[in-house]
Amino acid sequence: MNNQSKEIFDLIEKEKIRQENTIELIASENFCSKAIRDACGSVLTNKYAEGYPQKRYYSGCEFVDDIEAIAIDSAKKLFKCDFANVQPHSGSNANIISYFSFLNSGDKILGLSLDCGGHLTHGFKLNFSGTNYEAFQYTTDQDGFLDYDQILKQAQEIKPKMIVCGASAYPRKIDFKKFREIADSCNAYLMADMAHIAGLVATDLHMSPIPFADVITSTTHKTLRGPRGGFILSNKENEEKINKAAFPGFQGGPLEHIIAGKAICFIEAMDLSFVEYQKQVLKNAKILEQELLNYGFDLVTGGTDNHLLLVDLRKKNISGKKAQTLLESVGVSVNKNSIPNDPKSAMVTSGIRIGTPAITTRGCKEEEMKIIAKYINAVLSNPEDLDLHNKIKQEIKELLKNFPTP
Ligand SMILES: Cc1ncc(COP(=O)(O)O)c(C=O)c1O
């Protein structure tokens, strides 16, 4: 090992220790299994495989062909659909590829605005989705709920070619059937980005978008607990245009090491233990909801029925940015997040987003959620009390020793 790689491995070790000593509540993060990490760090990274199984532009693809075919079949089985493309390098790529498949530059799209919980790729003005397409945005109502009647009205006025549903920071269930009806009312395609809730969808704990959307995109690394990456689902009839849009349309060689990790992720998600895990993710979010409400925190929409909560900190007189920094200093990782009609900028915000997927993977249950809520309240209610913060930091380290990372 030369000095430079030693430096990198030292940093990786430090990151490992940081992860071990942190209560990870970032709603989009998780800990994938060792098997998935091994696949992602395997010799498959050496292999070029432009094209698709049995239709490659390079020799020596017999084994990666089998791996990618297993990933595709497992994704189709898990989500009960008849087409999957597992090549998108990320969730954003999956979204770009889906737009490329169904739209032309300049077409109208209608998606949830970033400050109401949407993703950058759903039409934000600084993102390709907002510059390459004529993007319109719907918002949530003043309590933070999707207002389907309002979205219907907007869709009929705008007549977008595609409606995008799905979110990055929405604590409630999404009614994909209603979105289908809205899309049908203006003859639009429906794209469902289930990145955040894929694990809940896979285990039937959240309505599946599969029967309703023309195209479904996702990441593998959030609730689904796989490697960092994306995938697309649809019907057989859209196979050719989506595959062409992914390669050669938008990407070059697929990341077969990550695809191997995705295959393991889909297979793991078919295990009964994964259903139990997702149920615990929901239970843990509910306990956090109750505890935080008891401590006097406001929650956007009043609570949660998925894996995340949006805490409105205005009443507590602390910004999302400050809360994030304070919590990080004791070993609790959350992210600052805008709340609907946030008076503060996106860099400061009035809220934080809290999610339970990662901490549940470590085995934390109801009792630990109560302790975590107590720490969050203690730190945010006593922002200047450094002695208290140090004490909590030590207690968190001790607590986490009982909950190893995979
Ligand atoms: C709903 C949604 N879609 C897409 C993405 C993008 O995924 P990636 O970061 O892998 O590009 C995210 C990421 O946070 C997301 O929340």
Image: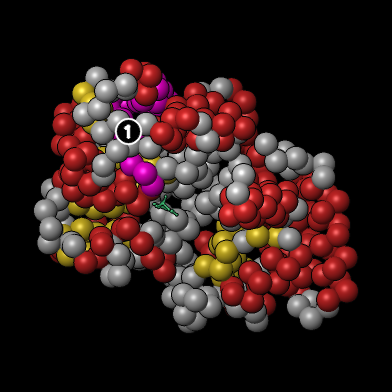
Crowding near the residue tagged with mark 1, few <14, some 14–19, many ≥20 C-alpha atoms within 10 Å? some
Give residue 120's quadrant in the image.
bottom left
In the displayed structure, does residue 148 sit left or right of residue 403? Answer: left
In the displayed structure, does residue 107 sit left or right of residue 346? Answer: left
Mark 1 lies on a secondary structure that is: loop
Position of residue 225 relative to residue 395, above or below, is: above
Position of residue 14 relative to residue 389, above or below, is: above
Q: Name the colouring of the figure.
A: secondary structure
Percent from the top left, x then y, of residue 1? 62, 44
Give residue 146's quadrant in the image.
bottom left
Position of residue 34 relative to residue 331, above or below, is: above
Position of residue 51 relative to residue 182, above or below, is: above
Percent from the top left, x then y, of residue 291? 73, 57
Percent from the top left, x then y, of residue 158? 15, 63
Locate the C terminus by quadrant: top right
- Give the residue drawn at x 67%, y 52%: 10
Taking the magenta stretch, the answer to whether it contains residue 85 is yes
Percent from the top left, x then y, of residue 6? 64, 50
- Give the residue drawn at x 25%, y 60%: 129
* Three-letter amino acid code of the residue under disc 1: Tyr
In the displayed structure, does residue 118 sit left or right of residue 97? Answer: right
Mark 1 sits on what residue?
Answer: 48
- Give the residue drawn at x 60%, y 33%: 33
Taking the magenta stretch, the answer to whether it contains residue 354 is no
**Residue 150 appearing in the image:** no
* Residue sitting nearer the eye, 112 or 25: 25
* Residue sitting nearer the eye, 374 or 144: 374
Q: Which residues are magenta?
A: 67-90
Q: Is mark 1 within 8 Å of ligand 1?
A: no
- Give the residue drawn at x 40%, y 22%: 67
